[in-house]
Image (cartoon, rainbow, N blue to C red):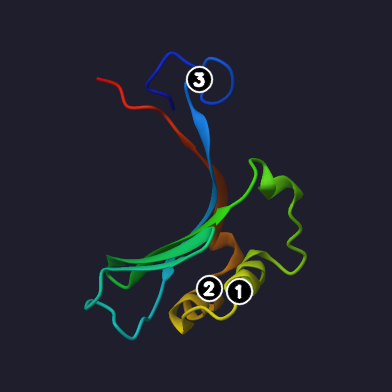
Amino acid sequence: ATMRDEPLKGDGSGVSYSGYTVFAGELDYDSFDNGKVGYKVYIGPGQYFVITDIGNGRYQWYAFLAREPGSADVEAKPDGTSPFLQDIFVGWSEDVHHILKATKEDEIAQRDLYDRPPSV
């Protein structure tokens, strides 16, 4: 759905690519700190990872990677998305790896992020 009479991307859309693609997961997850920590952010060069407790044992996570637009179509993930991300986040917090390993492939989506200038 669109709230503007403009194309979503491309010429005439008013948007520009942010430089990031995001992988998003949502799942039932038995975290050791369930109900105690609502939001965790892990930041590194050209990438960051966010884990959010959304209540009732449900969690969302986001892996932001600096990539060219359309990387979802050209970047190979022969073993699946979760193993692909586990390789990228080698050496990061065990919290990142634990939630990635708990996430099923059909619980992960990827999309490029675009920015629109503010309007007043």
Q: Amino acid at mark 2?
A: Leu
Q: Earlier in the sequence, mark 3 or mark 2?
A: 3
Q: Quadrant of residue 78 in the image?
A: bottom right
Q: Which quadrant of the rendered structure holds the C terminus? A: top left
Q: Are marks 1 and 2 in contact (CB under 8 Å)?
A: yes
Query: Regarding mark 3 in the picture, which secondary structure is present there?
Result: loop
Q: Quadrant of residue 84 in the image?
A: bottom right
Q: Looking at this view, is 45 or 116 the one in front?
A: 45
Q: Relative to residue 2, is residue 46 depicted above or below?
A: below
Q: Where is mark 1, residue-wise? A: 86
Residue 9 in percent (x, y) is at 55, 26
Q: Residue furthest bottom?
A: 32
Q: Could you tell me which residue is drawn at 62 percent across and 49 percent down?
A: 67
Q: Could you tell me which residue is drawn at 49 percent across and 81 percent down?
A: 98
Q: Where is mark 3, residue-wise? A: 13
Q: Relative to residue 14, is residue 112 depicted above or below?
A: below
Residue 13 in percent (x, y) is at 50, 20
> How many neighbours does mark 3 have within 10 angstroms: few (below 14), some (14-19), or many (20 or more)?
few
